[in-house]
Image (spheres, rainbow, N blue to C red):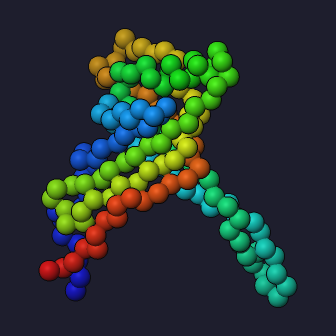
Amino acid sequence: MPFMKENDAISGKYAKSYITINGRVEELFYARSLEATIEKNKADVPTLGRTNVGKKATGWSGSGTLNIYYVTSLFRQLMQEYIKNGRDFYFDLQVVNEDPQSSAGKQTVVLKNCNLDSVIAAQFDATSDDTLNEDIPFTFDDYEILDQFSPLSNA
């Protein structure tokens, strides 16, 4: 009977992420977590002789949330440029998952033409022992899988 070995589960702690913006590549070593989702847009397709309503895919949209430690002004500076000059900004976000204990190998995904929805302009919390962090929601309009996980084997 096939089963997955415990060591093949991917630990997110080994992930790396990079942002490419204005021709500059920066490692997001201050990132805490990221989740990006692709959602299909579907249209209703009612048909004669059926009581259910079928669905037809008509497109897709990509969105995500990047959670980072509150230690960089990069995203606030980019948003300020948009506010002051009306020049919006887009960037690519690369995510590499490679757990050295897993035989699954490496997966590299690039989220393309990312655009921020909002940023925190300023924050503090004098009542908490936790470090400051921020959620940065974004959208993207393309993606590419550069490296794929290897199929797992039971050997």
Q: Residue at x 29, y 33 (%)?
A: 29
Residue 138 in sight here: no
Q: Is residue 133 above or below residue 155?
A: above
Q: Quadrant of the C terminus?
A: bottom left
Who is closer to the viewer here, 4 or 155?
155
Work out which residue is located at the far top of the displayed protein and give it.
126
Who is closer to the viewer here, 129 or 131?
131
Q: Residue at x 62, y 53 (%)?
A: 61
Q: Position of residue 122 (x, y in %)?
A: 49, 15
Work out which residue is located at the far front of the displayed protein and give it.
23
Q: Position of residue 56 (x, y in %)?
A: 71, 71
Specify the quadrant of the image occupied by residue 124: top left
Who is closer to the viewer here, 75 or 85?
85
Residue 81 in sight here: yes
Q: Is residue 81 above or below residue 53?
A: above
Q: Quadrant of the N terminus?
A: bottom left
Q: Residue at x 73, y 76 (%)?
A: 54
Q: Position of residue 7 (x, y in %)?
A: 16, 63
Side (left or right) of 37 relative to 154: right
Specify the quadrant of the image occupied by residue 44: bottom right
Who is closer to the viewer here, 152 or 144?
144
Q: Position of residue 82 (x, y in %)?
A: 62, 22
Work out which residue is located at the far right of the displayed protein and give it.
48
Q: Is residue 49 above or below residue 80?
A: below
Q: Is residue 97 above or below residue 84?
A: below
Side (left or right) of 70 relative to 47: left
Q: Residue at x 64, y 25 (%)?
A: 87
Specify the quadrant of the image occupied by residue 100: bottom left
